[in-house]
Image (cartoon, rainbow, N blue to C red):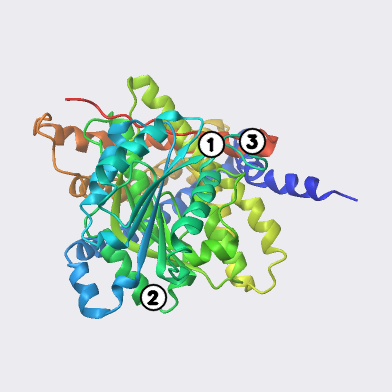
Amino acid sequence: MISRYTKYRLLEMLPASLVWITLISSVALSFIKPLWMVYFIIIFDFYWMSKVIYISTFLIISFRKYKHVMSVQWLKRCEQDFENYRDVYHLVLIPNASEGREVVETTFECLAKADYPKDRMIVVLAGEERFSSSIENGKAMQEKYGELFHSLIVTSHPDNLPGEIAAKGANLTWAGKIVKDTIIDPNTIPYENVVVSVFDVDTCIEPQFFSYLTHTYLSHPNPTRSSYQPIPMFSNNIWDAPAIMRVAATGTTFWLMAEQARPERLFTFSSHSMPFKAIIDVGWWEKDIISDDSRIFLQCLLHYDGDYEVTPLHMPVHMDTVLADTWWKSLVNLYKQQRRWAWGSENIPYMIWYFSRAKNISLKTRAYHLFNQLEGMWSWGTATVLIFILGYLPLAALDAETQTTVIAQTAPYILQFMLTIANVGLLLSVILGTLILPQRPTHHRFSKYAFMILQWALLPISMTIFGSIPAIDAQTRLMLGKYMGFYVTEKARKKH
């Protein structure tokens, strides 16, 4: 009899197994059956070209929605459309570990500029006991902004509690329970009237964010059965970051923006919002995982028998591009950040395990979400390696006789043609990447715009070194049972 542990471990091996089978088979078949691989590479490149065009189309759609949303006066819309809009309270949870005061200060400055009524905002800086600076940061924010909001509290999450790992989910659960017991329940605030926004500590909101979120929440036909996902833009310090960091950050923004035009595919990611009632119903965040931001969506999906979704918010929240004190340290931190995001593959065994028992969720819904996650993780680990590294290997391995065949003669031109067509995505990145840039700081010359355009030549390198490789790394660690801890990406701001 196979134990539950062994069964689950086998499921954890699935994502990396698919990636390694693909890569090893591609190399082996390039020498054993090179002509087969030529056909495979052509088919794969056609699939990738189609996917780039498909994603680019949705990116344009989402960009147009973003521009429209930013032009609307959302507080006025709330006042016009909902007499009871002030019944909605916003609970803002900001986990803070080792990040510096200047990062926290910027986040609170943006919260202070929010146009939503401050007496309906409960702000929590969720510190970690093991980092005394996080508690000191909280006290400084209390002293400066404490009277501005309905409440501003600082929590200190103890270290080494049973059943926990040092991760954000455990901190959020600790802070959330304190807020429930000390603010929400004593003030008899209905859980349905509380929207929780979980923000990374470097998250800077637009002034209209909470007004827009409130209008979206009240407009939703079933607001407590949905999370709300803004567009993560890694732009706070993008003018100061090295070029390859800018490419990686903007590429992530574009991928997530394109996903917003396909809400049926959305998972929650990074900074997002959700009903407090849903968090209570599912029993808080899991305390022993890394991918708490996406896992909380799956918890809700399972708890409500599939009656839960993610509603896109076509408004950005601005976060930091990876930047450290030195160029090399920035590269290392970027790799570790991408590897942590790729650790989201831990959701795949979780989905298979619990979806197999979730008979009240339609097979279509379960299959759709599972396929999207599997295909996404597989593509993340294999696509750029197959296109940029292994794509021409079978052509080089063809024998002299096969090299004279029509397919062998035309394959290089076919591949080049498809990659050229796929460059529409690169051109779109150049255009939109320039349009979404924040205002140029005065310490950068106007000529820096030229570098912001030329940087996209680094895209193949970025996609490989800071895309496929960390994805393979993370999935392989999961396969081998070498579980990762929660790596807190260093936040640094250059002083000018």
Q: Are marks 3 and 2 in contact (CB under 8 Å)?
A: no
Vertical comparison of 400 with 203: above or below: above
Q: Is residue 149 something that shows in the picture?
A: yes
* Spatial CA span between label 3 and label 1: 10 Å
- Identify the residue at horizontal 58%, vertical 71% (top origin): 306
Q: Quadrant of the C terminus?
A: top left
Q: Classify mark 3: residues with Cα within 10 Å, few (<14), some (14-19) or many (20+).
A: some
Q: Specify the amino acid type for callout 2.
A: His
Q: Which mark is residue 486?
A: 1
Q: Nearer the viewer, mark 3 or mark 1?
A: 1
Relative to the observer, which residue lies in front, 37 or 427?
A: 427
Relative to the observer, which residue lies in front, 403 or 366?
A: 366
- Identify the residue at horizontal 43%, vertical 44% (top origin): 410
Q: Classify mark 1: residues with Cα within 10 Å, few (<14), some (14-19) or many (20+).
A: some
In the rendered structure, which disc, 3 or 2, sits on the residue that comes first in sequence? 2
Q: Which residue is mark 3?
A: 483
| Quarter of image, res 355 | bottom right
How many circles with numbers are drawn on the protein? 3
Q: Which mark is residue 220?
A: 2
**Mark 3 secondary-structure assignment:** loop
**Mark 2 secondary-structure assignment:** loop
Q: Specify the amino acid type for callout 1.
A: Phe
Residue 311 in the image: state x and y as whole percent.
Answer: 40, 66
Q: Specify the amino acid type for callout 3.
A: Tyr
In the rendered structure, which disc, 2 or 1, sits on the residue that comes first in sequence? 2
